[in-house]
């Protein structure tokens, strides 16, 4: 397997294209024409059409997320729009690898093998590291207090939270963790932090300086937001719709940062290495 086709994607995918070309792959790209690194790399072939790209390889790698509007491929480095159903016309007997591919889109890409990178444990665990580092970076930039001595609530007890626990340990913050599952309480205590069950959340919300949300469903609705301190800052790293009622937060003048796709923003090279490592694992399975 020496050919790989890449369509669209952010800075992570740009770095991935360069890495793959350096490691001996014939890399073909489409939808990255506004990126200078791609344009200057003579080893990477820039295709003039979608048909040319797809015919160049049996493995097609695309963006994370695959689409932002449910219709077009996510191509931030291109002025061209490519609808998913148009891509599907050329993908017969090919393998498409991208991230966060909604199951409803599968009918647009029939007769092809589809692999969602964000359903791969090998990538999601590694991504949690970059996400956690990025979350702390955003928090430090957006708050007017040190993390040391702050009361910090993390909503959700998933991969990112577990990595955040270790990273925040050295800051001297008072860390609390909300969970909907009572079986997680003992694990949170084992990590050395204070658990809060969802039904007890409202009576605790008034003491936090910083809230980090990792839950991809609304937890902080208008009613719960009313309990926050005026200077509380919320960093929401969950995918749409996130865990915070954004309109209610705006009306209450609560500082809310919706920090999506942090791995690609804060650590594109490392994130590309993670994707490359995952791709190599996938190649062995195909």
Image (tube, rainbow, N blue to C red):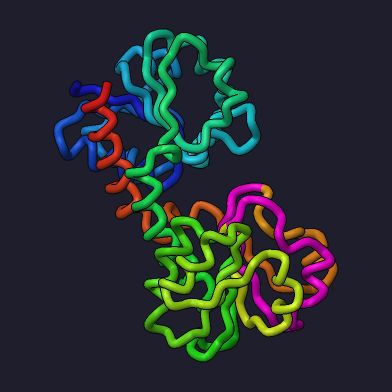
256 lies above or below 228: above
Q: Which residues are magenta?
A: 215-240
- Res. 171 image quadrant: bottom left
* Rendered residue at 39%/38% (across/down): 120
| Residue 268, horizontal then vertical, whole percent | 37, 53
| Residue 147, horizontal then vertical, whole percent | 50, 84
Direction left: furthest residue: 24
Q: How many marks?
A: 0
Is residue 236 on the magenta stretch?
A: yes
- Res. 122 image quadrant: top left
Q: In the depicted view, which residue is nearer to us: 127 or 169?
A: 169
* Rendered residue at 64%/47% (across/down): 240
- Give the position of the C terminus as an image quadrant: top left
* Rendered residue at 60%/38% (across/down): 68
- Give the position of the N terminus as an image quadrant: top left
Direction bottom: furthest residue: 149
**In the shown orientation, is residue 20 left or right of residue 245?**
left
**In the shown orientation, is residue 4 left or right of residue 218?**
left
| Residue 267, horizontal then vertical, whole percent | 37, 58
Q: In the depicted view, which residue is nearer to us: 104 or 43?
A: 104
- Res. 29 image quadrant: top left
Q: In the depicted view, which residue is nearer to us: 107 or 83?
A: 107
112 lies above or below 145: above
58 lies above or below 103: above
Q: In the depicted view, which residue is nearer to us: 123 or 259?
A: 123
Is residue 161 on the magenta stretch?
A: no
**In the shown orientation, is residue 57 left or right of residue 247?**
left
Tell me if residue 149 can be seen: yes
Q: Main secondary structure of the magenta part?
A: loop
Tell me if residue 34 can be seen: no
**In the shown orientation, is residue 142 left or right of residue 112?**
right
């Amino acid at each position: 397997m020496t050919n790989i086709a890449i369509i669209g994607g952010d800075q992570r995918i740009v770095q991935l294209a360069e890495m793959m070309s350096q490691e001996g792959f014939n890399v073909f790209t489409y939808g990255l024409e506004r990126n200078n690194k791609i344009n200057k790399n003579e080893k990477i072939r820039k295709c003039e059409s979608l048909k040319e790209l797809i015919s160049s390889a049996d493995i097609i790698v695309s963006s994370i997320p695959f689409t932002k509007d449910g219709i077009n491929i996510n191509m931030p480095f291109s002025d061209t729009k490519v609808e998913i159903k148009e891509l599907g016309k050329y993908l017969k007997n090919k393998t498409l690898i991208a991230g966060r591919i909604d199951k409803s889109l599968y009918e647009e890409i029939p007769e092809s093998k589809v692999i969602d990178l964000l359903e791969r444990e090998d990538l999601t665990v590694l991504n949690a590291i970059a996400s956690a580092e990025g979350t702390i970076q955003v928090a430090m930039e957006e708050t007017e207090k040190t993390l040391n001595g702050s009361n910090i609530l993390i909503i959700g007890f998933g991969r990112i939270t577990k990595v955040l626990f270790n990273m925040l340990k050295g800051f001297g913050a008072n860390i609390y963790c909300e969970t909907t599952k009572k079986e997680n309480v003992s694990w949170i205590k084992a990590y050395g932090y204070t658990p809060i069950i969802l039904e007890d959340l409202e009576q605790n919300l008034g003491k936090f300086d910083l809230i980090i949300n990792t839950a991809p469903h609304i937890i902080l609705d208008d009613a719960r937001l009313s309990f926050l301190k005026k200077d509380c800052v919320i960093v929401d790293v969950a995918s749409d719709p996130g865990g915070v009622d954004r309109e209610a937060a705006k009306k209450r003048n609560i500082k809310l940062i919706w920090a999506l796709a942090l791995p690609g923003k804060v650590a594109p090279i490392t994130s590309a290495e993670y994707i490359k490592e995952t791709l190599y694992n996938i190649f062995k399975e195909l």
